[in-house]
Image (cartoon, grey):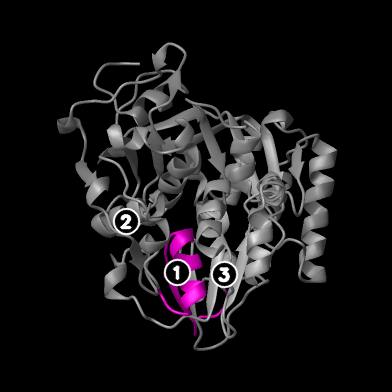
Amino acid sequence: MGDNQTLAEQIISAHTEKSVKAGEIVIVDVDGTMSHDAGAPYSIRAFEAMGGKKLWNPGRTAFVIDHAAPAPTSEISQLHLMIREFASKTGSRLFDAGEGICHQLMVENHLVKPGDLFLGGDSHTPTYGALGAFAIGVGATDIAGAWLTGKTWLRVPRSQLVILEGCLMPGVFPKDIILNLVCKIGMSGAIYEALEFSGAGLDNLSLSGKMTLANMAAETGAKSAIMMPETDHGPLFKFLPEKFYSAVHRVDLSELSPQVSLPNAPDKVTAVERVAGTKIHISFIGTCTNGRTEDLRAAAAVLKGQKIPKGTQLIIAPASRSILTEAIADGTAEIFLSAGATILPPGCGPCSGTHMGVPADGQTIISSANRNFPGRMGNPKADIYLASPAMVAASALAGEITDPRPFFKS
């Protein structure tokens, strides 16, 4: 690896035969792939059309059934069967329905490591950048090609630097950081670039919080999102002076207030004060963005001893079975059930709009998910607001968008 390289350039260089710079098109070795039930059938057919018989590395090939799980129709059940049979035939790793969401499972099961170059058949694959990996979402045929060869091609992206300073105030969460940043950058402000996160403020976040940031980097158009991986011997890579980045963004976490993304575009973001009081019908907590243990505990801190009023639904989908098990063991699940919430099987649930929580015409949803485009949850005639799990819980109690900070005063 040469001098004056961004994190993205350093990782890509380690996976090809030369030192690379932004703009170059290169063939790279991959460390692993992930496919889920919404895309894996296409990859399987493409692999077979390529004449594929044997996977490049079954141990580094993972399948997850999470988007429409358990299967809502016989047609989808047939696709799930195709995935199970292919995984069994090739000796690859299968996470079946109910085990959880693909991105959470890749991290929980240590299938992605710092410095990896990882491919996922999902646009939110950059989530693994929280570990210090260069992880990108690719199409079905690119996945199939990697299964066959262990390689892929890409154009080396430019990088934007995100510097986080300070500490979050009580009642403000990592989701608020990334919503604010998506607003600043815009949905097309980082197309085919990498967001590289740094700063003392980042050190104050848990892995769960970092995953939230990396996950929603996709909403800026970013190819990937990377945070400095640490080893026993210090940082694995190095940051460059600011002049080497295409853009630099600073966020003072201590000045941040709870943020809300308005319907139809993740970058239409405002402070909660601007929309507080907006009536909501459905509150949803979960997804690969905010369905982890600390998210559920933040929501439970709001809901403890409270009851959700009639006319309002609260739906919760833990990001994995292990997270659900933990929520049962520590009493979080009991708080949700006592409040009147519905707990779904671990998985994507209503986020993708396939089933379990599709709203009616004219209904308003507040969700901890990552996208709120028209039809995202299965009905283009419903409105979706995005917010932190704590705000979603507070809004469920009030029946309207509500600032969660009063629930976290010491």
Q: Is residue 178 visible?
A: yes
- Sequence-earlier tag: 1 or 3: 3
Q: Which residue is mark 3?
A: 306
Q: Nearer the viewer, mark 3 or mark 2?
A: 3
Image quadrant in which the N terminus is located: top left
Asked if residue 65 lies left or right of residue 399, the reply is right
- Sequence-earlier tag: 1 or 2: 2
Q: Is residue 370 visible?
A: no
Badge 2 amino acid: Val
Badge 1 amino acid: Asn
Disc 3 + disc 2, Cβ < 8 Å: no
| Magenta region, residue range | 378-401
Quarter holding residue 272: bottom left
Give how far across and how far down residue 172 sits, in percent.
36, 54
The residue at the point 51 percent across, 85 percent down is 363
Badge 3 amino acid: Gln
Q: Which residue is mark 2?
A: 182
Disc 1 + disc 3, Cβ < 8 Å: no
Q: Is residue 386 magenta?
A: yes
